[in-house]
Amino acid sequence: VSLPAILLLLIFGFTAGPVTSFINPNEIFGDLLLPLVSVSVAIILFEGGLSLKFSEVKEVTSVIRNMVTVGVLVSWVLTSIASYFIFGLGLEISVLLGAVLVVTGPTVIGPLLRHVRPSGRVGSIIKWEGIVIDPIGAILAVLVFEFIISGGLEKATAQVVISIFKTIIAGTLLGFAGAQLVVLILRRHWVPDFLQNPVSLMIVVFVFVASNVIQVESGLLSVTLMGIALANQKKVSIRHIVEFKENLRVLFISSLFIILAARLSLDDLSSILNFHGFLFLLLMIVAVRPLSIFISTYLSDLNLREKLFLSWMAPRGIVAAAVASVFA
């Protein structure tokens, strides 16, 4: 029987971490763990952006737009309500958890799509959603967190508005500037061929870090936009960069799934493997995601089978785990 590789990676991570204590990522990496995870996620999202071509979604642009706007809002509200009543969390923590869980994630969507190989347009829709929604979810979680820790409604609202403005400006300018710099370097042959991949990787990391300095978690938006801009330009060939980043993606995804699964403890597992945990998971699968899809695609020409497929394809990936670790 053919199994998705991510399932085996998770099983290995659980076995090496909480079951046998053979690997303890916190001891191995120390304070570098979360920065390494963040940079790895940024490179994964950049590589995902390189796979997004506008030409493949001309007919379903409105569907993708609605899924990452209306769909995000529906998922956020319903997940927050579910966590509030099922887990008994406070309103603020429930809203924050709902923001974290609006993402799906290319680290899981990509391998599953290669395993399932859907026909038609649903593959492109789910791929675009999985990549674009990750930075949106991370930024949303940061905005909610800033709203929670800011004192007073007026001050919190002002802080959120400023953060949104900084995120859009920093993410857009740095993302497109990074893409133009890579194009310029390739066109002018400023670096030899064998250094083009390392230099492009360096620029991606610089854009990510610089954007995060301006506004927390805006770096994910920057690198995603940088990848999309490079993928849709016609000035230079980036095929060798795409191949290099694909190899890095496989390496990072394999490592991250094992590392993050190994960070769990048996107490963590026992606290969620109960009636409340399974009820929450059931609602996420059979209620929250389907409602999000059917509401956001209500006016589209997608048929029932396509909507059902989209409703059952919403695994949470590395970004959700990494963002949750930041706010833990």
Image (cartoon, rainbow, N blue to C red):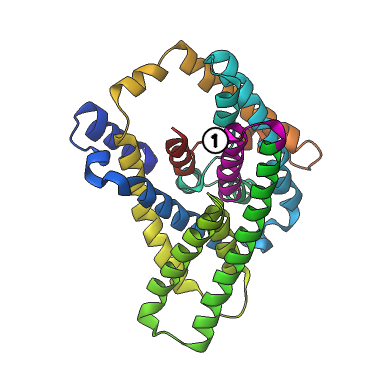
Residue 177 rendering spot, x and y as whole percentages: 59, 71
The reply to whether residue 35 is visible in this rendering is yes
From the viewer's perspective, tell me whether residue 39 is left or right of residue 300: left
50 relative to 16, above or below = below
Q: From the image, give the main secondary structure of the stretch colored magenta.
A: helix
Image x and y of residue 179, in percent: 56, 71
Task: Tell me the residue at 45%/87% (across/down).
Answer: 190
Relative placement, left or right, of 53 versus 31 is right
Label 1 sits on a secondary structure element that is helix
Residue 324 position, x and y percent, is: 46, 35
Q: Does 149 appear in magenta?
A: yes
Identify the residue at image location x=60%, y=59%: 171
List x then y, in percent, for residue 221.
Answer: 58, 54
In the rendered view, tell whether residue 175 sits above or below residue 264.
below
Q: Residue at x 35, y 23 (%)?
A: 268
Q: Residue at x 62, y 32 (%)?
A: 151
Instruction: Find out whether residue 305 is within the magenta segment.
Output: no
